[in-house]
Image (cartoon, helix red, strand yellow):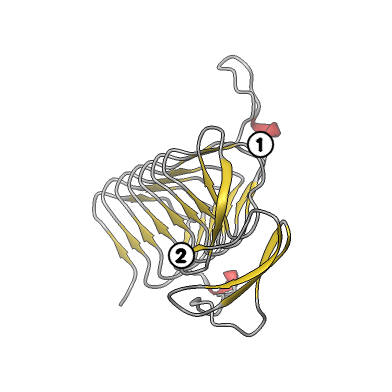
Amino acid sequence: MTTFIHPSAVVDEGAHIGKDTRVWHFTHICAGAQIGSDVSIGQNVFISARAVVGSRCKIQNNVSVYDAVTLEDDVFCGPSAVFTNVYNPRAHVERKHEYRPTLVKRGATLGANCTIVCGVTIGTGAFVGAGAVVTSDVPDYALMVGVPARQLGWVSDYGERLPLPLSGHGQARCPHTGTLYLLKDNTLSRQDGSHDGFHRSQDPAEAHS
C-alpha cells in the first residue's frame, strides 16, 4: 500500500504525511500539519497547520482538527466530531495567541457529533459517546456520555464495557481479549504485559511528505 490522496483533496506544500495514509474527497490539509502513517482521513476533513495526528488514526467525514489539537496513535474520530481551540470566542476579538491545547491520547474514541471543548485531555483508551460534550479531562478507559459529558463506566482497549464501579477497588477482564484491568480508587490501568491490541508506536520523525 502507498499513500493515496484523492484528486479533489488539497494538500498544501509543507504538510507532512506518513506512508500508507489515505486522504479522501474534498479534504484540506494545511502546510505544517503532522500526520503519521496508515491514517484514514475521510471526506470533507480539515487539518490545520499546527495540528498533529498520530499513526493509524481514523478521522471520519466532516471533522476539523484545528491548531493546538494533538491526536496520538490509534485515535478514532467519528463523523462530525467537533474540536475547538478558543474557549471564549468573539468575532471582533483576535484570540489566536490564546489557543488552549487539546490532547487525545492513544486508542481513544470520539463518537459521532461529540464536541471537545478546548483545553482538555482525553485519556488513553477512553470512549466518548455520540453527541457528548466534553468540558473537562477524561480519565484513561473512561466511558463518557451526555451534555455535559459524565462518566458512565469503563471500557477496555478493545472497546468492551467492563463490569466495574466508577471508583473503589476491583478487577475485570476484557470479554474479547482477556486483558486484565485493575481499578484503584478512581483510576483504571491495564495489567503490565497484557495484550492491548495496539501496534508499536511510530516515531513522528518517520513521517514524510
Question: Residue 20: where, in percent of width, then height?
Answer: 37, 72
In which quarter of the view is residue 67 placed? top right
Tell me the kind of residue under disc 2.
Answer: Glu
Alpha carbons under labels 1 and 2: distance apart: 34 Å
First in sequence, mark 1 or 2: give its number.
1
Which residue: 38% across, 44% down? Answer: 112
Which residue: 24% across, 49% down? Answer: 8
Pick the residue in front: 29 or 196: 196
Q: Residues within 10 Å of mark 2 (few under 14, many from 20)?
A: some
Question: Residue 52: where, in percent of width, then height?
Answer: 55, 55
Numbered disc in front, either 1 or 2: 2
- Label placed on residue 42: none
- The answer to whether residue 76 is above or below residue 173 is above
- Secondary structure state at the residue bearing disc 1: loop
Report the residue marked by disc 2. 160
Question: Residue 88: where, in percent of width, then height?
Answer: 64, 24
Tell me the kind of residue under disc 1.
Answer: Tyr
Considering every residue shown, the one lying at the far top of the view is 92
- The answer to whether residue 160 is above or below residue 166 is below
In which quarter of the view is residue 19 placed? bottom left
- Label placed on residue 99: 1
On the picture, is 121 further left or further right than 148? right
Pick the residue in front: 163 or 63: 163
- Secondary structure state at the residue bearing disc 2: loop
